[in-house]
Image (cartoon, rainbow, N blue to C red):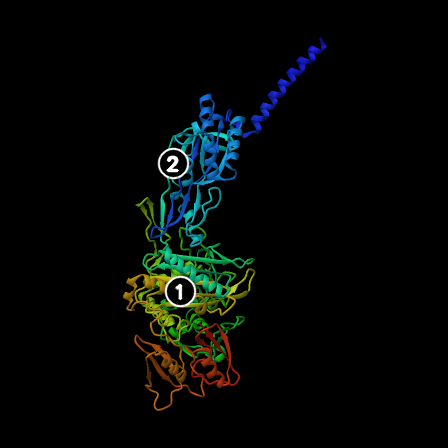
């Protein structure tokens, strides 16, 4: 009797334990939530994400379908189905071996047969990350062909992957789409259009949180996203990236960026960003510096300074400022600012337009002090009126916050701030904001918001046009704009005195622009290294494109904007001019960077004469204004059918003009006059620190910049 009672007790105890176990299973296993997870549930189906296209229709980003393949062997539940499966198994195993590998045909046969006979798992993994064309192949396998997933048990689960066919071109601007995280770039800016509309489908959970379609039909079909047509031109983007990489590598810089804008529309035709990995030294598009890095612009800000000055009517381009020996202390307690000419005695009196042409810090600061010294708040108000210190409001997230004093009552304002700001310090702008400001000069005063996309498409049909946005109809008077345009042309005029005088020599187009060389600030205060920049537009008389280039902390082969940044501008401009025939309407001819006749440096007459005679190059000697003196040195100019050698007077008691000469000829002349020569760069002499015609001092140092 007691034994029977214990047996009954044990049975009830086991039954109770089973109930508890089932309760725990329901609570802990997500497969059993909502009462019965084996029943289909209505699930949201994400649509196909729209594509991102270049201006010419090239694919920049697209969701490429990838599929995971699983098998549910429990669908084979009748004798006839099993007979059919076993008959097809050898061919099916052989097909799996050919397509997926991993095991031989016999191994696949055993694997599939074991899964069928075991009959417990409804989630047998066959292959992962299958491309679309491979899916088509798999659907033609024996046993699978002609059957839906409910009959064959083989089911594909889509896992879209975002691919960029031309990566890393404009990688950061195109951006990243993170469904569960923070997206960036164009992917984020147009996420709602690209995302489309989700659908609904009955789904069944088969393992953990893995769901498969319960039927082949949708309750509501997902609607794919729209395509975004960007303003990016793939060829120009490629040229900009290559040119930027060449200069960042040559000068071993930390990072660099280049922006190309269409003047009339504000379309960003190309935007390149390169950052050096401090550990490996490799360059990559890891951050959008053009969009997000607000830095002190240095001398490129002088354009805004002169705009504010000229708009007052209190100073004119022809007004003279005495820059003296090239050194100036604006106020007590301020650091002394200097011009590059200071070691050679300075520029002396300069017209305001020459101050800009030569990028004189002293002249710019003196002009700002002369006009706004008594009322510096008017200076800040004038800059605010131009738009300095205000974001552009571009559609891409992450635009850097420009920095500019708003009031002289701020604690950070000092007696030095006016003159410091005038030459591009105590103010910060992103390269894109600087490009937009220069573009406004090219566009006759219209401040245009940079545009990265111009249309949303459904296939080839334009659904929504994204218009050009004019932020300000005119940022300055026509008189001021005309004066600034002329000054920018002087900076780049060949054979002039501008800081970019040699950069565009022998080009069939004219450029209006400004070089910039600023000290690079470091976190916590102070400066380390330099920042080189060049911003401008071309063709000068009929502007079509604005280009801004900034390169951070170049550490070798020079650091001036004309040496480091301007060659990137030139490479991009060469490409645009050579591929867009309409630009020749500027008055230039066809681009011929490599003429049929060799281009020679200026130099020693006898050497060039012998060289041309040896090579059979026709040349003429121009002795105009030289008199009967023997010719020792000449300037060489390559014409269409001959080279003209113009005789040059080289005075024995003054510093000679060695620009355009080879280093060998320049050294011979300079050292003969007792000068010590420092050299930056390689190639032809581009700039010299001692002005031609000044009296040399025995042992004095002259710096030659070569390019």
Q: Looking at the image, which residue sits at the far top?
A: 1
* Quadrant assignment for the C terminus: bottom left
Q: Residue at x 52, y 39 (%)?
A: 102
Q: How far apart are marks 2 and 1 (CA)?
A: 46 Å
Picture coordinates of residue 267 (x, y %)?
35, 56
Q: Dot 1 corresponds to which residue?
A: 569
Picture coordinates of residue 234 (x, y %)?
37, 55
User: Quick one: label 2 or label 1, which is nearer the N terminus?
Assistant: 2
Foreground: 427 or 203?
203
Foreground: 41 or 436?
41
**Which dot marks residue 222?**
2
Q: Which residue is drawn at 32% across and 56% down?
A: 265
Dot 1: element: helix
Q: Which residue is drawn at 33% across and 83% down?
A: 621
Q: In which quarter of the image is residue 450?
A: bottom left
Picture coordinates of residue 446 (x, y %)?
33, 59
Picture coordinates of residue 343 (x, y %)?
50, 78
Give the crowd class for mark 2: few <14, some 14-19, many >=20 residues within 10 Å.
Answer: some
Determine whether, in the image, residue 57 is placed left or right of residue 528: left
């Amino acid at each position: 009797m007691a034994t029977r009672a214990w047996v009954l007790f044990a049975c009830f105890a086991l039954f109770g334990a089973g109930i508890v176990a089932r309760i725990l299973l329901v609570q802990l296993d997500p497969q059993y939530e909502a009462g019965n997870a084996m029943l289909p549930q209505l699930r949201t189906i994400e649509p196909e994400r729209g594509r991102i296209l270049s201006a010419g229709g090239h694919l920049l980003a697209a969701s490429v379908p990838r599929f995971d393949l699983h098998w549910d062997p429990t669908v084979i539940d009748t004798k006839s189905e099993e007979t059919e499966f076993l008959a097809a198994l050898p061919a099916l195993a052989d097909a799996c071996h050919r397509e997926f590998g991993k095991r031989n045909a016999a191994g696949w046969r055993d694997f599939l047969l074991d899964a069928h006979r075991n009959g417990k798992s409804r989630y047998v993994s066959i292959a992962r990350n299958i491309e679309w064309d491979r899916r088509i192949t798999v659907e033609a396998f024996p046993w699978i062909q002609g059957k839906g997933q409910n009959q064959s048990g083989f089911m594909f689960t889509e896992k879209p992957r975002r691919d960029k066919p031309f990566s890393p071109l404009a990688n950061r601007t195109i951006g990243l789409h993170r469904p569960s995280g923070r997206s960036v770039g164009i992917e984020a800016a147009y996420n709602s259009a690209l995302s489309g509309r989700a659908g609904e489908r009955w789904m069944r959970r088969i393992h953990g949180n893995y769901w498969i379609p319960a039927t082949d039909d949708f309750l509501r079909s997902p609607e794919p996203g729209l395509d975004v047509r960007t303003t990016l031109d793939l060829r120009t983007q490629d040229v900009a990236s290559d040119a930027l990489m060449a200069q960042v590598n040559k000068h071993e810089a930390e990072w660099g960026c280049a922006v190309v804008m269409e003047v009339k529309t504000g379309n960003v035709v190309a935007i390149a960003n390169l950052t050096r990995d401090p550990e490996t030294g490799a360059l990559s598009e890891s951050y959008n510096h053009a969009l997000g890095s607000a830095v002190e612009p240095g001398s490129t800000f002088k354009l805004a300074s002169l705009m504010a000055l000229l708009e007052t009517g209190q100073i004119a381009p022809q007004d003279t400022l005495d820059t003296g020996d090239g050194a100036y202390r604006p106020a007590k307690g301020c650091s002394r600012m200097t011009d590059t000419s200071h070691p050679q005695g300075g520029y002396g009196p300069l017209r305001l337009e020459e101050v800009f042409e030569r990028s004189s810090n002293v002249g710019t600061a003196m002009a700002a002090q002369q006009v706004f010294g008594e009322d510096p708040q008017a200076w800040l108000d004038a800059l605010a009126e131009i738009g300095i210190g205000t974001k552009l409001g571009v559609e891409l997230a992450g635009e850097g916050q420009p920095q500019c004093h708003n009031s002289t009552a701020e604690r950070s304002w000092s007696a030095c701030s006016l003159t410091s700001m005038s030459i591009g310090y105590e103010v910060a702008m992103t390269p894109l904001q600087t490009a937009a400001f220069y573009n406004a000069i090219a566009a006759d005063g219209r401040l245009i918001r940079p545009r990265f996309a111009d249309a949303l498409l459904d296939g080839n049909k334009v659904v929504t046009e994204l218009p050009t946005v004019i932020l300000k109809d005119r940022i300055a008077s026509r008189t001021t704009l005309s004066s600034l345009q002329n000054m920018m042309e002087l900076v780049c005029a060949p054979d002039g005195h501008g800081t970019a005088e040699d950069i565009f020599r022998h080009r069939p187009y004219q450029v209006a622009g400004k070089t910039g060389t600023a000290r690079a600030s470091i976190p916590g205060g102070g400066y380390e290294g330099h920042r080189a920049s060049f911003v401008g537009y071309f063709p000068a008389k009929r502007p079509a494109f604005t280009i801004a280039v900034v390169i951070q902390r170049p550490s070798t082969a020079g650091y001036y904007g004309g040496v480091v940044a301007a060659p990137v501008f030139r490479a991009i401009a060469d490409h645009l001019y050579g591929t867009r025939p309409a630009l020749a309407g500027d008055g230039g001819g066809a681009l011929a960077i490599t003429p049929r006749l060799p281009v020679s440096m200026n130099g020693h007459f006898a050497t060039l004469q012998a060289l041309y005679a040896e090579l059979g190059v026709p040349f003429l000697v121009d002795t105009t204004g030289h008199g009967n003196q023997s010719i020792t040195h000449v300037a060489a100019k390559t014409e269409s059918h001959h080279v003209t050698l113009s005789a040059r007077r080289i005075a024995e008691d003054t510093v000679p003009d060695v620009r355009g000469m080879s280093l060998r000829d320049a050294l011979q002349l300079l050292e003969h006059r007792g000068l010590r020569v420092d050299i930056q760069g390689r190639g032809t002499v581009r700039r010299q620190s001692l002005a031609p015609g000044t009296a040399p001092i025995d042992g004095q140092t002259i710096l030659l910049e070569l390019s």
